[in-house]
Image: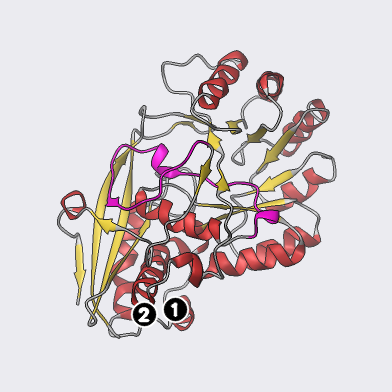
Amino acid sequence: MKITRINIYAVDLPGKGGSYRRTTGFSPDSNSSTIVKIDTDAGISGVGEICPLGTHYMRGWAEGVRAGAPHVARLILGEDPFHVDRLNRLWDVKFKEDLFVKTPFDMALYDIMGQATGRPVSDLLGGRYDAPVPLYRTVHLFREHEDTAETWAKRCIDYRGQGYRCFQIKAGTAPDADIARIEAVCDILEPGETAIADANTGWSLTGAIRVANAVRHLPVIIEQPCRTMEECIAFRRHCSLPVKLDEVMETTQDVIRGYHAGAMDIVAIKIGRVGGLTKARRMRELCLDLGLTVVPDDVWGSEIVTSALAHFAQSTHPKYTLNTTDLTDYVEVSTADGCPERDGAVLSASTAPGLGLTPRMEVLGDPVAVIE
């Protein structure tokens, strides 16, 4: 089997409810997703997707994906899609850095391999566990919401009504406001519910320590308190609460460094950030061998990202899985049929071959680039 053609598409994904409040201010009303479709001489096609959050969240941005994607496509044209590890090494040598550009290609290769073998992608990632994966829900304040501690607590109650039991609230602003926000949310938690305070790198080291000391008696997980690994390592020396690292977890080397420094208990592995399912699996297996809890995750996206994420999460040992997310719950546009739907507060991957998807070509529209 050989790769014969690669189409690259651009699709805008408006957020449900519009822009929402983040540490950096309000997010864009819509984020631009890049979808890659790889065709083979066997008549099998696979799809992959990457959707950076504007320019404010990670190293990648949409225009960067679409500038780099044709270069990656030319590297793998004519190659065997089953040679996924070799192709990862190839594009890492010949297209340095910019892991996010490689993500949709790697994802599409897994989709092709699954369809060709009649197996779901979760089988290719090590095997499916029977238990559905619990979900977390990022709690958003939109423009119409007053930014008070009580509003954040009320929003958690709203999402509880939709079935969610793990609430990720946004922090990383003024420490006093964040302390009040965390206290208000923890006050409304019911048995079995979890709160995560995600600073998205927004605190200074001193601000993060101040917040952690003030809420040390509360049942909350602190996520990505500071911008750099050095700050997070220093922070952890002052914090007895569980710590989850996200933005600074990009490679296996980051996991090793953070583990040896005792910087975290939980690692968010975002497929889009780390360069695809191949690298995400390597990071996951390292975390599990080290006894770290993981959150199989991704940055943003539609059904294609969510399906890949569901397979990644479903093939992760439940003992070491905190939760995952359903990104289709955040966006208005649907790009494919066949995506698994959440059942209350859990998600299960499809058992269909590959990612289990049929792309909606009328939504993808005309490709922005064709490599053949």
Q: Residue at x 36, y 80 (%)?
A: 81
SS label for mark 2? loop
Q: Residues within 10 Å of mark 1 (few under 14, many from 20)?
A: some
Q: Residues within 10 Å of mark 2 (few under 14, many from 20)?
A: many
Q: Residue 347: x and y, percent?
A: 50, 47
The amino acid on which the numbered mark 1 sits, given as a three-letter code, is Val
Asked if the stretch drawn in magenta spans residue 78, the answer is no
Left or right of 233, for residue 84: left
Q: Residue 345: x and y, percent?
A: 54, 38
State the residue lying farthest toward the front.
130
Classify 34 as above or below 79: above
Q: Give me the C-alpha separation between circle 1 and circle 2.
A: 6 Å
Q: Are marks 1 and 2 in contact (CB under 8 Å)?
A: yes
> Which of these two is toward me, 79 or 71?
79
SS label for mark 1? helix
**Residues in magenta?**
317-344
Question: Quadrant location of the C terminus?
Answer: bottom left
Left or right of 197, for residue 354: left
Classify 295 as above or below 71: above
Left or right of 19, for residue 249: right
Q: Residue at x 48, y 24 (%)?
A: 141
Q: Residue 73: x and y, percent?
A: 30, 73
Residue under label 2, please give it. 81
Residue under label 1, please give it. 84
